[in-house]
Amino acid sequence: MDSTINKLARTAACVAFALVALTACKLNLGLFSTEYSFNGSSIDYTKTKSIQISDFPIRSNYVWGPMGNMFNNQLKDEYANHTKLTQVKRNGDLKLDGEITRYEQRNKSVSAEGSSALVELSMTVNVRFVNNTNHEEDFEKQFTASQSYDSKLSLNAVQEELVSQMVKDIVSQIFNATVANW
């Protein structure tokens, strides 16, 4: 019995170590100096050294005050934490700008009594990306995320958590579309 527990403990420790090692791994392919990492970025740091991220203003009809700062800070943090790019105010090798174009809620489902049972909150961000080292990668597109909540709850009660989740989702989509193109 004790040997079985010891084997399980050792196996669990090995699995935990392997997971930590994999999440920390980076593969540098030498000749091309492109770094591929498990955080999803693939950047040729010999050509691309900086990124310019403009603040994204809110242009939607419906607004929740903290949303703009949440989005802008999380976007900048994502690139700071997962790339070696220097963030600059102008003339970046990569440039990101855009605006938050939609923030709205709508009924998603109806209860048996005919009233709203579930409400969907959604957010859309328009992004313009310029890669000054390879203009074939330039784009302008919209990224959307949504979250649902029980209509018995007030939006004020759930808004911060839902917006936080949508911002995280959209920032991840933008990061993947710009520097995780492998």
Image: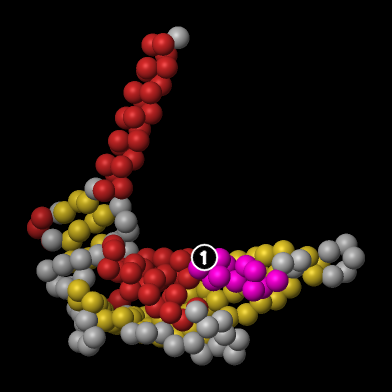
Q: In which quarter of the image is residue 115?
A: bottom right
Report the residue marked by disc 1: 165
* Amino acid under disc 1: Gln
Residue 173 appearing in the image: no
Residue 77, percent from left and from top: 33, 69
Q: In this view, does 136 lie above or below 158?
A: below
**Horizontal and vertical percent for residue 59?**
51, 90
**Residue interval drawn in magenta:** 154-164
Q: Using the image, determine if residue 54 lies above or below residue 181.
A: below
The N terminus: image quadrant: top left
Badge 1: residue crowd in 10 Å (few <14, some 14–19, many ≥20):
some
Rendered-image quadrant of the C terminus: bottom left
Q: Which residue is drawn at 37% across and 17% down?
A: 6
Name of the residue lying farthest toward the right: 113
Q: Does the magenta stretch include residue 166?
A: no
Is 80 on the left or on the right of 145, as rendered? left
Q: Going by the image, does 118 lie left or right of 81? A: right
Instruction: Answer with left or right where residue 4 lies relative to residue 48.
Output: right
Q: What element carries label 1?
A: helix
Picture quadrant where residue 95 is located? bottom left
Query: Majority secondary structure of the magenta segment?
Result: helix
40 up-or-down from 162: above or below: above
Identify the residue at horizontal 35%, vertical 32% (top origin): 15
